[in-house]
Amino acid sequence: MVINYDEKAVMKEVFNVMNFIKCPYEALPKDNPDTYVMRPKPLKGTLFVSFDNLGFLSGQVRVRGKGKGEYPFHYLEMIDHVFGREENTIEVCSGSVNGGCFTVDINPETNPQIVDDGQTLAKIPSDSFNRWRCDPPYNENTAKKMYATDLPKPIRLLEAGARVCKPHSLLFLLLGPANYQWHPKGTKRIAYIDVTVVPNNEVRCLNVFYKYSDG
Ligand SMILES: C[S@@+](CC[C@H](N)C(=O)[O-])C[C@H]1O[C@@H](n2cnc3c(N)ncnc32)[C@H](O)[C@@H]1O
């Protein structure tokens, strides 16, 4: 028997982001709870999911910047703490990241496992990974001056990421100050986290997506 249903509508009905949360959380306020609240350890900050929208997590974390465009201190540990560790992860625009994931960068001098454009990932078969992380240059100026590349388009990075991930994967895209709403077919944006960087007071935005089906 074939059951016809609108996959997107079903996702809206039944999707609960709390099913992905692996860290301790609390329902607050205690006398009449309306929100789940959690700590993004080892970073400082607060993340929350309100009972009236269980499909979305928001919040803010404070990080210490590392320089040379690297991930801020403890940023990756925070992701593992909140969403659980995933061994089968692809790290796109990997830069200095190595170990514990499969690395891809367009610049061979960063010694990634594969040199490839993250907007296509042409050398990587579809449905290969359970998680995708990506940290592209934050703006045109940085792309040109720091990495001698063009600025990759977030939607194209996401499309390639969604293709190489299996259904039920999470995709983590760290951008500059961009509350990034677009997402490829078959994915849903499930979290937006403000990342404020000290000491230079920059803002980064972590946008998290869930791939529910092959687009
Ligand atoms: C902000 S850095 C990433 C830093 C990394 N998170 C770290 O902790 O070292 C951006 C990286 O994206 C790479 N890059 C730029 N355009 C790319 C593209 N189209 N595909 C793959 N990598 C790209 C650059 O070579 C650079 O290594």
Image: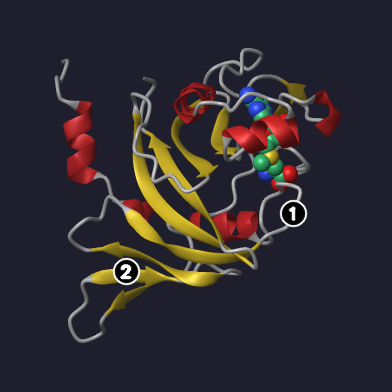
Q: Report the Cα–Cα distance between label 2 and label 1.
A: 34 Å
Residue at image location 34% in from the left, 38% down from the top: 181
Residue at image location 19% in from the left, 35% down from the top: 10
Number of the front mark, 2 or 1: 1
The local crowd at label 2, few if under 14, some if 14 to 19, many if 20 or more residues have their Cα within 10 Å, is some
Residue 123 in view in this figure = yes
Q: Position of residue 204 (x, y in %)?
A: 52, 52
Instruction: Please determine whether, in this image, residue 77 is positioned above or below residue 29.
Output: above
Q: Secondary structure at mark 1?
A: loop
Label 1 CB, ligand 1: below 8 Å?
Answer: no
Quarter of image, ligand 1? top right
Residue 203 is left or right of residue 212, and the answer is: right
Q: Which residue is mark 1?
A: 67
Q: Nearer the viewer, residue 42 or 71?
A: 71
Q: Quadrant of residue 75?
A: bottom right
Q: How is the image coloured?
A: secondary structure
Q: Secondary structure at mark 2?
A: strand
Instruction: Please determine whether, in this image, residue 177 is positioned above or below residue 161.
Output: below
Q: Nearer the viewer, residue 168 or 105?
A: 105
Instruction: Please determine whether, in this image, residue 198 is positioned above or below residue 87.
Output: below
Q: Quadrant of the N terminus?
A: top left
Q: Position of residue 113 (x, y in %)?
A: 78, 27
Badge 2 or badge 1: first in the primary sequence: 2
Q: Position of residue 85 (x, y in %)?
A: 59, 51
Residue at image location 35% in from the left, 65% down from the top: 48
Q: Quadrant of the C terminus?
A: top left
Q: Say which amino acid is labelled 2.
A: Tyr
**Label 1 near label 2: C-beta < 8 Å?**
no
Q: Which residue is mark 2?
A: 36
Q: Position of residue 116 (x, y in %)?
A: 69, 19
